[in-house]
């Protein structure tokens, strides 16, 4: 499960796997939240930080995001 700190829920790497459906914010966390399917989970997606490769539902291209951009895991 996700760690809850105050009012913020922090998603951990073990909470996400390939095929999970998540709500993720693009643009380094400042973009609108989108529903996405996880295509890859990386302990070091970039700059030593954990993250995911994902495809937004209905999109044709994939993106990556740091794990702290994932708001929540809908389906594991």
Image (spheres, rainbow, N blue to C red):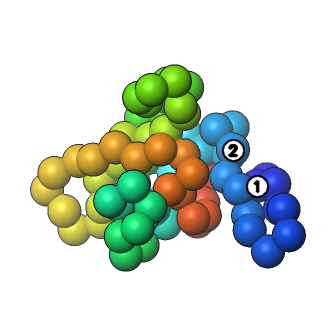
Foreground: 35 or 26? 26
Q: Residue at x 69, y 37 (%)?
A: 14
Q: Position of residue 45 (x, y in %)?
A: 43, 30
Q: Position of residue 47 (x, y in %)?
A: 45, 26
Is 7 drawn above or below residue 52 in the view shown?
below
Is 11 placed left or right of 41 in the picture?
A: right
Tell me if I can see residue 18 in this picture: no
Q: Residues under labels 2 and 1: Cα distance?
A: 6 Å
- How many residues crowd mark 2 within 10 Å: few (<14), some (14–19), many (20+)? some
Is 59 placed left or right of 74 in the picture?
A: left
Q: Residue at x 32, y 59 (%)?
A: 27
Query: In the figure, residue 8 lies in which quadrant?
Result: bottom right
Is 33 placed left or right of 14 in the picture?
A: left
* Residue on which disc 1 sits: 2
Q: Position of residue 70 (x, y in %)?
A: 53, 57
* Residue on which disc 2 sits: 12
Is 13 placed left or right of 69 in the picture?
A: right
Q: Residue at x 73, y 64 (%)?
A: 9
Mark 2 and mark 1 in contact? Answer it, CB < 8 Å: yes
């Amino acid at each position: 499960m996700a760690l809850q700190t105050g009012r913020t829920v922090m998603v951990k790497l073990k909470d996400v796997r390939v095929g999970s459906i998540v709500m993720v914010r693009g643009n380094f966390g400042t973009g609108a939240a989108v529903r996405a399917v996880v295509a890859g989970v990386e302990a070091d997606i970039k700059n030593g930080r954990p993250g995911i490769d994902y495809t937004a539902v209905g999109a044709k291209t994939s993106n990556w995001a740091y794990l702290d951009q994932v708001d929540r895991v809908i389906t594991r």
